[in-house]
Image (spheres, rainbow, N blue to C red):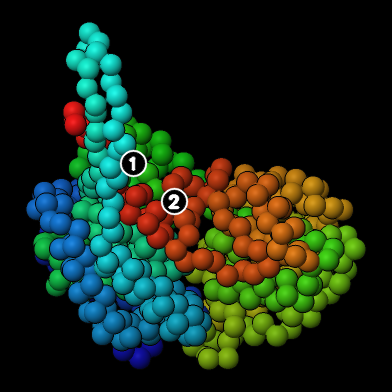
Amino acid sequence: MSGIDVEQEWKLLIGGEHISTASNYEIIDPNTTKLIGRAPEATVEQALQAAAAAKAALPAWKALSMDERCSYIAKAADALEVACPDWVDLVQAETGATIRVAKTMQVAGAFIDRFRYYSRSFEMNQPLTPVYSAASALAPEALITGNVIRQPAGVVACITPYNFPLVNVAGKIAPALAMGNTVVIKPAPQDPLAIIKLGEVLNSIFPPGVVNVIVGSSPQIGEALVDSPDVNMISFTGSSSVGAKIMEGGGKTMKRLLMELGGKGALIMTEDCDVQSAVGGIASVWGFHSGQICTAPTRVICHKDIYDDTVQALKAVSEFMTIGDARDENTLVGPVITETHRNRVEAFIQSGLDDGAEMIVGGERPDREGFFIAPTLLAGCSPEMHVVQEEAFGPVVVVMSHDGDQNAIELANQSDYGLFSYVYAGNTTRAYDIAKKLETGNVALNSVAPHMYAPFGGFKMSGVGRDRGRWGLEAYSEVQAINWPS
């Protein structure tokens, strides 16, 4: 853990000031189970102070033009390019990500790209076509024209997950700030330290109160932001159960919501698909960040004619998924985030076995320090099983068989979730036809690669709203129509 000072004091960011807290809590490296730091434990009062600071900074910030706001975001991107390479050890230690993932994805790549993307100004206004309005008791005859403009939502509470803390928060605050909102960032309690560093950089660039950071292990901190009348919008990434509570709590003050929630990605394989290509796609995500990714294709729906070949190919691939020290460049599968989460994933696997699934590979706990789980493959699954219906958020893949496209579509849609699905078929036309019938916000064809600027979000219990690309700006705005006689 070179470069990590276990005794460093970490502070909140409220209204441009770095604030100490009366207490703190421990942050543990999932790879070694060793202490890496003590995070500040905010109080509910401090959470409300951060919301009030963001509200106080809002009028001046939203009064700037989008070009002016985007210039701040460009400066932030430049500063982060310089600062964030020094954060790799910290981010790797607190997230448990393998060093390759930490270097190329956690602290680089999409993290900086999202600031760069939203540092360019977008035209958000739309003129209305003039329409004839006949004379009435309300108004005289007129030709009415107008404009539809986008106004900032206001103060946005950005509540982020533990799996990709920097990348996720960048995808929230960059479009929110570009649209003229101010923000309060509430990172996941498991790994908030890099977010505090991010806040320090942003605080040196943006006016005081535009960006605030609140940290705490208690759920009351997030609840305070949801309840606060100073907060106009909640942007949340996390579990569907917590998302439902946010919807309920935010309804009291009509909070605007953007929520990316759980997933149980279906991957359909037709009988004429390229099995090796599909298996390669599954394998690339199976152990990626130890399965702690909501878009993972963990529910494989394979045609019966290629079922056995697919299961055996997945078994063979698992032998190359190296489990080991997350700091080793050769390691492909690192730990999950906490001991509690490992216990949850292990119970999830056991429920599958209890329901009659067949263990093909994995299931054991590697004999090493850290919160490791071996990549696990369960075959012979049926749609009613808990392991088929719920998200493990761990390196667990389940396989079912289908007897044709319609049956595959039915099995894929037999889920409360609908975030990201995949179709592997002999040609793109067939894959596209299947994709249109899937109840899911995103579908990748013959690939597991996403389009990073496509609208991202889910159907059903997988969320509300869309972000990324231009849709990200729209998500953090209110629509206002202004009309007048021409």
The residue closer to the viewer here, 40 or 470, is 470
Q: Is residue 245 above or below residue 179?
A: above
The residue closer to the viewer here, 338 or 402, is 402
Amino acid carrying label 1: it is Arg
Pinpoint residue 484: horizontal percent, then vertical percent: 18, 30
Q: Which mark is residue 466?
A: 2
Q: Nearer the viewer, mark 1 or mark 2?
A: 2
Residue 389 is at least partly visible in this image: no
Q: In which quarter of the view is residue 19 placed?
A: bottom left
Residue that appears at 19% across and 15% down: 140
Q: In which quarter of the view is residue 114 placed?
A: bottom left
> Where does the C terminus fall, quadrant-wise?
top left
The residue closer to the viewer here, 433 or 50, is 433
Q: Is residue 221 above or below residue 79?
A: above
Residue that appears at 24% across and 33% down: 145
Q: Which mark is residue 256?
A: 1
Q: Which mark is residue 461?
A: none
Alpha-carbon distance for marks 1 and 2?
A: 13 Å
Name the secondary structure under disc 2: loop
Q: Residue furthest top?
A: 137
